[in-house]
Image (tube, helix red, strand yellow):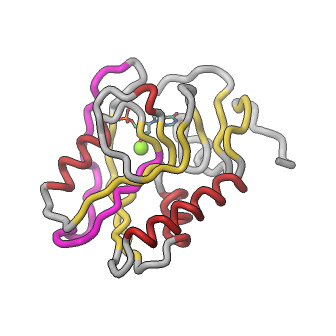
Amino acid sequence: MSAPLPSGIERVLFTEEEIALRIGELGARISRDYAGKTVKLVGILKGSIFFLTALARAIEVPVKMDFLGISSFSNRSGAPGVVRIAKDLDDAIEGEDVLLVEDIVDTGFTLRYLLQNLAGRAPNSLAVCTFLDRTSRRIVQVPVDYRCFEIPDRFVVGFGLDFQQLYRNLGYVAVMKHEKTV
Ligand code: IMP
Ligand code: MG
């Protein structure tokens, strides 16, 4: 990393190169699993967009995309999160092979809500692909079909993940200097 780290950043967890490599591997796996199908990537705004666009380019079967905006009040104290859809999908997903794309699965509350909501719209199939997975903090069990990286119990930013809306544009994933709460 040639540029100095921003002052709030402690250390880089995954470099741009490591991320690109893993996304390439995941894209190849998804291409094999969805051979002969069209996969609809459903991205959760805003955290997943950097991951989703990179993943889409690594997938070799036909790809469609749509986006869901949510307000999530889940916090790191373990209180159940309240999730609400702030921007719905543009199109129906009935009969489609949907791959829900998340930035990070933490407690699992957000994902559980989204899976219940999308399953109710009768897709042909529904699977989950997350950039980061912090299984040590899971409270509700949710199925994660594809993931790039398992991460330790530290707050991370970059490659789409934010702290107070900042740091999403970092090309790498980094640990914040002081334990932050969301
Ligand atoms: P869950 O409902 O606890 O699984 O919450 C997942 C959501 O919390 C993610 O989609 C993120 O928006 C946010 N989140 C959890 N951990 C982090 C982190 O380390 N950095 C940035 N956002 C996080
Ligand atoms: Mg999110």
User: Along the horizontal axis of the image, is 113 left or right of 25?
Assistant: left
Please report the residue visible at 26 percent of the width from the left and 38 percent of the height from the top: 83
Residue 102 is one of the magenta-drawn residues: yes
Where residue 22 sits: x, y (%)? 60, 56
Residue 46 visible somewhere in the drawing = no
Q: Residue furthest right?
A: 2
- Left or right for 166, reference 8: left
Residue 54: x and y in percent read: 56, 64
In the foreground, 10 or 125: 125
Q: In this view, does 119 lie to the left or right of 8?
A: left
Quadrant of the displayed image that contains ligand 2: top left
Query: In the rendered view, would you say 155 is above or below 66?
Result: above
Q: Any magenta on residue 35?
A: no
Q: How many marks?
A: 0
User: Who's the residue at 19% across and 65% down the image?
Assistant: 123
Location of residue 65 in the rendering, given as x and y in whole percent from the top left corner: 38, 70
Which picture quadrant has residue 4?
top right
> For the point 28% across and 69% down, which residue is it?
97
Residue beneath the point at 44% across and 32% down:
135
State whether residue 143 is above or below residue 62.
Answer: above
Above or below residue 143? Residue 140 is: above
Dividing the picture into quadrants, the one containing residue 119 is bottom left
Q: Position of residue 99 (x, y in %)?
A: 34, 61
Q: What stretch is highlighted in magenta?
A: 78-103
The vertical placement of 57 against 121, above or below, is below
8 vs 101, left or right, is right
- The answer to whether residue 53 is visible is yes
